[in-house]
Amino acid sequence: MNKPLQLPTVLTWTGEYKINGSKLRGFMEDDEGRIVYVLYEFQSEEEKRFHQSIPLVGKQYVVEGVVVEPSKPPHKYAFSMENYLKGKGAKGILEISNWRFVKTKTSFSQRISSHRYKLIKHIESTFPQTLTAEAQALLIGYQEQVDHETSRAYQILGITHLFAISGLHIAIVSFMFFQGLLRLNVRREIATIVLIVILPIYAILAGGTPSVWRSVLMVELVVLIRYKSHLTVDDALCVSFICFVLLEPWSIYQVGFQLSYLATAALIFSSHIINRFSSWIVQSFFITFVCQLLVYPLLLFHFYEMSISSFMVNIPFVPLFSFIILPINILLLVLTFLPGPFASIMFWLYEPCRLFITKLIEVLQSLPYQLWNPGKPSLFLLAIAFVGVFITFYLLDIRDKWYKVVISLLLPILCLHFSGKAFNELKISFINVGQGDSILIELPFQKEVVLIDTGGLLRFQQEEWKMPSPPYEVGRQIVVPYLKGKGINVIDKLIITHADADHVEGAEEILKEIKVVEIHISPGSYKKEIMDDLITEAVKQQIPIKEQLSLNHWKVQNVTFQYVWPDETTYEGNNDSLGLYIKKGNFDALFTGDLEKEGEYELISKLPELKNIDLLKAGHHGSKTSSTEEFINQLNPSLTIFSAGENNRYGHPSKEVVERFNQLELSSLVTGEVGTIEIKVEEEQLKLETTYTRENQ
């Protein structure tokens, strides 16, 4: 914070907060208007239920606690809490240890936000469960009930914006409201003034996100243009942008803000291109095309992928949601406030139809090759992409020959697609998955991609009310973003060293997002319960699962992969972890899973030639039950990596083991201390890059 927060202090809840499991997270502000991100842990289930039953917006508390630094992202492609707070204008994070309610600070926006909360609860209590999330999202911009599977299906099809309150959405709601006033014999001038007054209220009711306010401001300015102004639509866009930046300058860091204004600008400045076509189907295609064309570099920069199918899927789904589903939801909401069976009858008629659409979306999103994932572009490539976009718009505007348009569009796309694969060195990345293992190996030009383990959480028994929903998933939230950020679409071999949760739990989510050619496991480990989800998903996708033993090997280009452990088929745990040895020229590396001292003794006794290696992944996260002196003395690794979580409950890596490496003057790094570790092997030399340095911890 610029000015330290003096504790205890009085803070007031804003409308942005979320209760999940035993945690309450959200934004509060002090008397000076400074926004603070807060975290509070409920002491009992009764306390949680009480806070779930009331709207918190406007409620003031005297709080005590400690201001903490935002957690660092595990790698450069992961969610950054620091950037998130920057986009919200928040000045820090406060972990509340104790608080006391003071009063409710009433204001116009607080009253509207309270009504929003009541509307959320009303929809939950009156709509069928299958329709609740959609109604809340479409009518008031509340998306907390939208489950991950549904959200991901919409992302794959490129129709996520249909669940957001867009300019078209606001325009339709405004039209229906305006026409309703006219049908009630309200004069047009009065109806216009009422609409201008009502729209900001609806913006607050709909959550007040940047896209909502942009849409409301645009509609209001257009109404004013038609009423008593000579302001053009593009001027209206600029005015709304300036107003937004002046009032909330931090909004420019929000992805939704950036995409919203870019997409709107694309529609406004290419309207004459779209209007050249008389067919509504062709017009619909070009509306999606120009929007996607202008925002696609930004989509890749933030999300590393974009939907290809969106160009066609939006043609039927935009009018379906905008002109049928949205009005039906408005009608259903109105009916729930009326006495009689009208709402029940409408739900009975509408729900089967809506479920059919959901099934159709599920089928469509399951089709392969719908996402283009070239990885995160550099700023240089981002600039090239935008230059290509502007040239394409210019050529379309002057009606130049079609092949020039294609060339101007495809050249940057090809640069983006192949840039992540244009390297001639062996890359090894130790992904910071917390207390667990996940190691990515990329051969030159990504000719072979190998992933060793997928991370995961060791989940402990806790009361049901404390369990978050959905649960935190390492595979989906850490490993998948890293793979997609590097433009990896195919994993040739997924190696699960052994059946421990912190090595295998993330596998199922990875299989759902990334194509896997084959899976290697330790003999007999498939019988363990923790492997069930992986096995089920692999069988569903028909991915072969192969048990591996010592001396099994394969070779790609000039890189040799050889299993050196285990040498028996009976699975008993850590000491039956798959041990993988890699050799490229004079460089070699050994990855030992959770191998402990008994396995280490047997390994070096059977392979006395295994010595003086360049890179070692220490066994069992650096536990004192592994990395024995005899093992380390024989291997004599130039660099050792301990894959262990920061401040983990097990104390990994053990002080005893770290001291052993220090005494032998051997270099070592811990993922929990330096983040994800990326190693490039260039002509037998190691080049090292970490997410952050020890000094910054």
Image: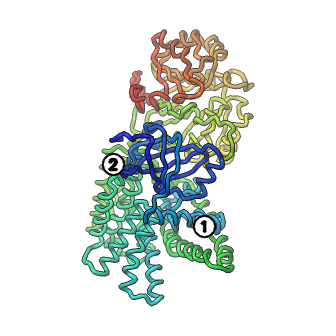
Q: Are marks 1 and 2 in contact (CB under 8 Å)?
A: no
Amino acid type for the residue under numbered disc 1 = His
* Crowd tier of the residue under label 1, counting other residues whose Cα lies within 10 Å: few below 14, some 14–19, many 20 or above: some
Is the residue 661 above or below the residue 112 in the image?
above
Q: In the rendered view, does 500 fall on the left or right side of 452?
A: right
Q: In the rendered view, does 677 fall on the left or right side of 547?
A: left
Specify the quadrant of the image occupied by residue 520. top right
Is the residue 413 above or below the residue 633 in the image?
below
Q: Quadrant of the N terminus?
A: top left
Disc number placed over residue 592 in the picture, else none: none
Is the residue 598 above or below the residue 24 in the image?
above
User: In this figure, which residue is indicated by the disc labeled 1?
Assistant: 122
User: In this figure, which residue is indicated by the disc labeled 2?
Assistant: 382
Q: Earlier in the sequence, mark 1 or mark 2?
A: 1
Between 400 and 152, which is closer to the camera in this rendering? 152
Residue shown at the point (67%, 37%) measured from the top left: 545
Residue shown at the point (63%, 63%) measured from the top left: 359
**Distance from the alpha carbon under mark 1 to that under mark 2:** 45 Å
Question: Residue 418, image x and y in percent?
Answer: 40, 44
* Crowd tier of the residue under label 2, counting other residues whose Cα lies within 10 Å: few below 14, some 14–19, many 20 or above: some
Q: Which element is circle 2 on?
A: helix
